[in-house]
């Protein structure tokens, strides 16, 4: 039986192609280069007024902050912007609370204040409203000032925008895990100066970050005891019927055992915790951090003077020390007003502590070299977790003196891995184009050139050799055994929109070969390794992920947004006719929301269990079970078949699963399907009737008929799956022409005969996949 794939409705594709047709029928005058510059200059003429308005908002904030108690302001807004409940965490994920708290933190530590006057609600409300206005005005200002050499520059704008409003690059468990893995290599250095290991140091920094929650729990104990005492007091007071009794009752209550017991319980809480009822929940009462480290990561009010420096004083993207010094020191007391910042900046905090310990002339040898080695090892290890059974080779040499960080071989796929642990510097993060260019050259372009060179070497000869550091040949590759070569650039810092839109680097003269590399932040790779269920899913993802760079009209902000879109929608755009110009499709982060919710649930932020996202999760009757069984055969070229199966849509998965069920039930002997543009056909056959020669001839006939060269036979048993692969040249043949004609005649007769016997609701034998009543019955 042959199964043709019916045309499936694709609203997304239809909408895009409708837009393409409409744009083709319209004529839009294009601004010439001079007109564009003139338009841009008019915008810049109004910038002084715009800058003045922003300065007025900042002055308003300064006035309000200086008018009352700084600690009260920090307490109030840290509580307002930091805490989420299980009911609000989803909403809070999309909010700008972190930006507001960071800005307030920077401004207060920059201007300082000794005012102890209590803040009224009006001042606090005004600060909140002004922060919102400042955020919106600042975003517009970044848009208008994101130019380079006198012309608007998208890279600068997107990077400046990201630096201003986006916080965090990893889920907390991954950030902690990465830091513990990396900095454990420097335990001897830390122990020699501070008598503390990296794990203990990290645990104590996290302990400090969690202080507000712990203090809040202690405050709750106080209130619980007080509420119980109040409840007893009210019950006793109900017995009072006169003023005389009231006065007597109050005197007796002051001397009562119940009040004494309550006071004793409150005192016990204090004795056990050292936290008083009136303490700020953000106060750090005790810590095992060495005093020198605590001072290094603390800032006093008025010390953040760099934040003032900039074209606009105290502008949100000005340099600030709050990320290197997240603890606020007021008098002799320490406060953690921004717990999230401790998590977000854990890696840089540890790096600063370590580099302060190592003499500058030994930084390269004793830190940066080991940092690079960690990235190489960990990125290869994560790929190995995704592709179990793959062969991994590290630090190879080839040619005269060329090197490659790693090569991974999985079936007929090669992954060339180049790891770059260079920093994406503050200036680059702030949008400085020259620094972005310099940093991305070191991180991406050098990896790209090294990986391209290794690929060209592999395909240069039938057999190529790679050596280890001792010049011993450890890997020989036959290029005819390889079906795909993928280039991977692993990074230790996220490049955000740059890695998700590598085409933007072409303006720097980078990525010039007719080839793409996958630039991936280590912790994003970690997420993918934890969510991907089958190796073949990863093969489909990396193939489509690299191909995604061919569609600069489609914009997604970060890697996990792209990965989330893959899990949900497939990340396949090849069959869509996009407009050639004047069109851009921004896909928001909603497709990664399920990934966020899953990890927030794992971290304990959500009560409701969140299912781990999965590829084909929305397709109940998918054939991933079949893909897994084929993978387990580990036969040569199995991944060509598994990638093909995973590339089929949900409707086809359901159809194949239905036919497999019929084969197992002995209600069908075989069926086959194919995709012309993939040049692959697949025959499903029952194991009980399988013979190699018969299937070879049958596939030869299908191959000649469809002009498809590659054919796979999937052999279905009751509890087993196997496959064979055939390749046909499909050269002209009179014999095969006659057989194909006979096959077509047989199918026609079969269909006509079936019309007499088939039930209305049975699958039509013509191969449409539709029910008989909706297909050939009408003909």
Image (spheres, rainbow, N blue to C red):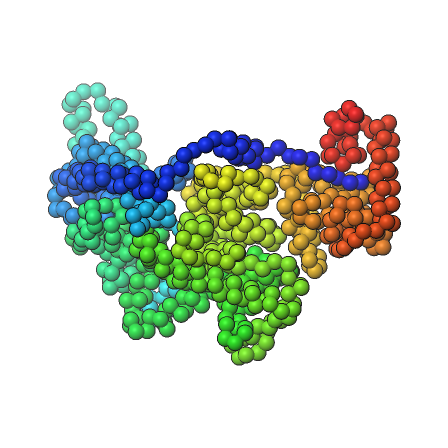
Q: Residue at x 27, y 48 (%)?
A: 317
Q: Is residue 494 left or right of residue 570?
A: left
* Residue 254 quadrant: top left
Q: How many marks?
A: 0
Taking the image as drawn, is residue 737 in sight? yes
Could you say where residue 504 lies in the image, as x and y percent from the top left? 42, 50
Q: Residue at x 52, y 63 (%)?
A: 452
Could you say where residue 154 lies in the image, as x and y percent from the top left? 37, 46
Q: Quadrant of the N terminus?
A: top right
Q: Quadrant of the C terminus?
A: top right
Q: Is residue 197 above or below residue 160?
A: below
The residue nearer to you, when weighing 618 against 649, is 649
The residue nearer to you, when weighing 36 against 773, is 36
Taking the image as drawn, is residue 689 in sight? no
* Residue 176 quadrant: bottom left
Could you say where residue 650 lies in the image, as x and y percent from the top left? 64, 39
Q: Residue at x 67, y 48 (%)?
A: 678
Q: Residue at x 43, y 53 (%)?
A: 506
The residue nearer to you, when weighing 279 against 538, is 538
Q: Is residue 182 left or right of residue 636?
A: left
């Amino acid at each position: 039986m042959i199964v043709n794939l019916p045309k499936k409705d694709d609203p997304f594709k239809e909408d895009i192609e409708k837009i393409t047709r409409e744009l083709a029928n319209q004529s839009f005058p294009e601004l010439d280069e001079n007109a564009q510059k003139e338009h841009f200059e008019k915008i810049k003429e109004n910038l002084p007024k715009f800058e003045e308005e922003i300065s007025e908002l900042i002055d308003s904030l300064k006035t309000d902050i200086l008018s009352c108690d700084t600690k009260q302001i920090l307490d109030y807004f840290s509580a307002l912007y930091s805490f989420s409940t299980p009911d609000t965490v989803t909403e809070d994920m999309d909010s700008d609370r972190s930006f507001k708290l960071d800005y307030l933190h920077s401004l207060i530590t920059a201007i300082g204040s000794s005012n102890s006057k209590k803040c009224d609600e009006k001042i606090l409300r005004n600060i909140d409203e002004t922060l919102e206005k400042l955020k919106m005005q600042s975003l517009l200002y970044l848009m208008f000032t994101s130019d380079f050499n006198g012309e608007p520059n998208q890279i600068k704008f997107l990077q400046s925008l990201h630096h201003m409003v986006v916080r965090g690059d990893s889920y907390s468990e991954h950030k902690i895990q990465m830091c513990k893995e990396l900095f454990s290599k420097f335990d001897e250095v830390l122990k020699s100066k501070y008598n503390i290991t990296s794990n203990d140091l990290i645990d104590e920094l996290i302990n400090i970050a969690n202080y507000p929650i712990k203090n809040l729990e202690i405050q709750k104990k106080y209130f619980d005891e007080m509420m119980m005492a109040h409840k007893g007091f009210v019950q006793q007071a109900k017995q009072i019927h006169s003023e005389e009794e009231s006065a007597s009752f109050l005197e007796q209550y002051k001397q009562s055992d119940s009040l004494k017991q309550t006071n004793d319980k409150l005192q016990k809480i204090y004795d056990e915790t050292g936290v008083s009822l009136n303490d700020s929940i953000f106060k750090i009462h005790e810590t095992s951090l060495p005093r020198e480290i605590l001072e290094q990561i603390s800032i006093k009010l008025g010390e953040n003077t760099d934040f003032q420096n900039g074209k606009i004083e105290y502008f949100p993207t000005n340099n600030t020390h709050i990320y290197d010094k997240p603890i606020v020191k007021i008098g002799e007391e320490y406060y953690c007003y921004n717990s999230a910042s401790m998590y977000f900046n854990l890696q840089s905090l540890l790096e600063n502590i370590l580099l302060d310990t190592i003499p500058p002339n030994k930084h390269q040898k004793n830190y940066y070299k080991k940092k690079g080695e960690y990235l190489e090892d960990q990125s290869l290890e994560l790929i190995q977790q995704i592709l179990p059974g793959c062969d991994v080779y590290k630090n190879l040499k080839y040619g005269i003196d060329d090197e490659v960080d790693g090569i991974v071989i999985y079936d007929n796929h090669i992954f060339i891995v180049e790891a770059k642990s260079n920093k994406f510097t503050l200036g680059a993060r702030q949008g400085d184009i020259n620094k972005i260019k310099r940093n991305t050259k070191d991180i991406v372009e050098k990896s790209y050139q090294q990986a391209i060179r290794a690929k060209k070497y592999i395909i240069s000869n039938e057999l190529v050799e790679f050596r280890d550091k001792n010049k011993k040949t450890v890997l020989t590759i036959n290029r005819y055994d390889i079906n795909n070569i993928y280039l991977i650039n692993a990074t230790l810092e996220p490049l955000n929109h740059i890695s998700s839109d590598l085409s933007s680097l072409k303006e720097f003269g980078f990525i010039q070969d007719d080839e793409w590399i996958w630039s991936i932040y280590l912790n994003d790779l970690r997420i993918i390794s934890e969510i991907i269920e089958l190796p073949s899913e990863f093969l489909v993802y990396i193939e489509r992920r690299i191909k995604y760079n061919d569609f600069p009209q489609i914009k997604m902000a970060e890697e996990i947004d792209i990965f989330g879109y893959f899990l949900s929608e497939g990340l396949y755009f090849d069959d869509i006719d996009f407009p050639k110009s004047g069109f851009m499709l921004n896909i928001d982060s909603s497709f990664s929301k399920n990934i966020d919710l899953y990890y927030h649930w794992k971290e304990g932020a959500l009560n409701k269990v969140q299912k781990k996202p999965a590829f084909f999760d929305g397709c109940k009757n998918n054939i991933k079970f079949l893909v897994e069984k084929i993978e387990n055969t580990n036969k040569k070229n199995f991944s060509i078949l598994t990638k093909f199966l995973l590339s089929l849509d949900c409707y086809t998965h359901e159809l194949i699963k239905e036919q497999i069920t019929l084969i197992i039930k002995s209600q069908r002997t075989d069926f086959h399907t194919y995709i012309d543009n993939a040049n692959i056909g697949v025959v499903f056959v029952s194991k009980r009737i399988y013979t190699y020669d018969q299937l070879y001839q049958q596939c030869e006939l299908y191959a000649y008929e469809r002009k498809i060269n590659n054919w796979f036979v999937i052999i279905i048993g009751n509890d087993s799956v196997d496959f064979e692969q055939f390749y046909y040249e499909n050269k002209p043949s009179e014999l095969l022409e006659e057989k194909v004609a006979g096959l077509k005649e047989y199918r026609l007769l079969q269909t006509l005969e079936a019309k007499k016997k088939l039930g209305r609701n049975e699958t039509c034998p013509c191969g449409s996949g539709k029910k008989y009543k909706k297909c050939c019955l009408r003909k």
